Amino acid sequence: MRYITAGESHGPSLTGIVEGVPAGLPLTEEEIATHLVRRQQGYGRGGRMAFEKDFATISSGLRFGKTMGGPIAMSMPNRAFEKDDAGWPTVMNKKEEAEGIEKITLPRPGHADLVGAQKYNFDDIRPVIERSSARETAMRVACCSIARKFLKHFGIEIGGHVLRIGSMGFESWDEVRTIADPLADKGAEAIYKAADESDVRCLDEELSQQMREEIKVRRKEGSSLGGIYEIVITGLPVGLGSYVHWDRKLDGQLAQAIMSTQAMKGVEIGLGFEAGHRPGHEVHDEITYENNSFGRRTNRMGGIEGGMSTGMPIILRGVMKPIPTMLNPLSTVDMKTKEETETRYERSDVCALPRAVVVAESVLAPVLANAFLEKFGGDSIEDIEANVKAAVQ
């Protein structure tokens, strides 16, 4: 199962193609829209969310409400293009360059602007801004929601929540586990549904308020904030992934999916970096055997050992940097004049982390779906169901 997206932030639409989805999976556009709506919610949003209501229309690969085994194509109009406050049909004209279009030559520190222009030999960073924008993640969420539906069909759930925004957040692994693990016992979707009750997607009400206050402070300063989030995955069988080759290790594939997402600067599995300053007896999970099944007494390894799923919930954390577009400018160099100056401001969020959690949940789904298909493969849902049933007998 793989997907590809196309489109620009202020172009007419985003397009996505998903292939490798087995035949017979029940699917609706409304199910995909569930996570698109979630992606647009969260405290600290910019003005674009006031009018951008995303909906992906399926144009192929679906018949009578079920997948047919062929590529699934989707399109999503950009309301920003249609609204046309800034003349986007002219600025993003696909046929010919119009006169009087301003070239943007002030790259933002921390963004793809300068390096992208150098790589593709642009004298205007607009093409870089348009494609590298996090707007692309709208279609990515749509594409990955199909993989999420596939996983859910087999009892595998994904849920995320915010651990920290700026200086405000949980202080310890054990503190998080006390809140998140009882929810995970009901399935990981219980985590995201509880987190969605908070506009910063934090499971702790007091911390949620502290995070809001931190965002208010940075907004007044004209600055921005990043943070840390956690994704939990439940229902995975033992043995997805492999230890025999580097590129088949499940944790490596999951980490790559996170790092492929805009603004992510770090990822850890289970205790992650904290494991580096604990003794071994406080890191590894003792093995148990109860009710004819192996298990773990704890889950500090985050559900993965040797690049393979252990059957315990997978716990993964990601770090998002602060958004580089800020009202209070940073210093940069004009690409045209080579003179030092200040960055220009384009409408942006103060903190996109609550929305980015939904993207992070989503991009993990195809990785997990492919690992599942590698072990229980088949061309149709019925084939895979039979293979899973045979494997557990």
Image (cartoon, helix red, strand yellow):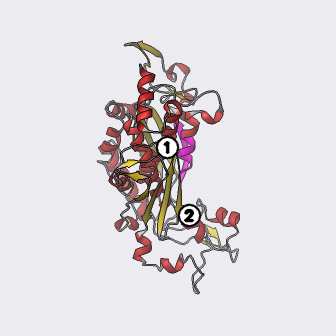
Res. 115 image quadrant? bottom right
What residue sits right under mark 2 in the picture? 131
Q: Earlier in the sequence, mark 1 or mark 2?
A: 2
Q: Residue 160: horizontal and vertical position, in percent? A: 40, 42
Task: Say which of 6 and 192 sits in front.
Answer: 6
Magenta residues? 254-270
Answer whether residue 263 is magenta in the image.
Answer: yes
Q: SS at mark 2?
A: helix
Q: Measured along the vertical axis of the image, is residue 79 above or below residue 41? A: below
What residue sits right under mark 1 in the picture? 366
Query: What amino acid type is highlighted by mark number 2?
Result: Arg
Q: Measured along the vertical axis of the image, is residue 236 above or below residue 2? A: above
Q: SS at mark 1?
A: helix
Query: What amino acid type is highlighted by mark number 1?
Result: Pro
Q: Residues within 10 Å of mark 1 (few under 14, many from 20)?
A: many
Q: Measured along the vertical axis of the image, is residue 347 above or below residue 60? A: below
Nearest-to-viewer mark from 1 and 2: 1
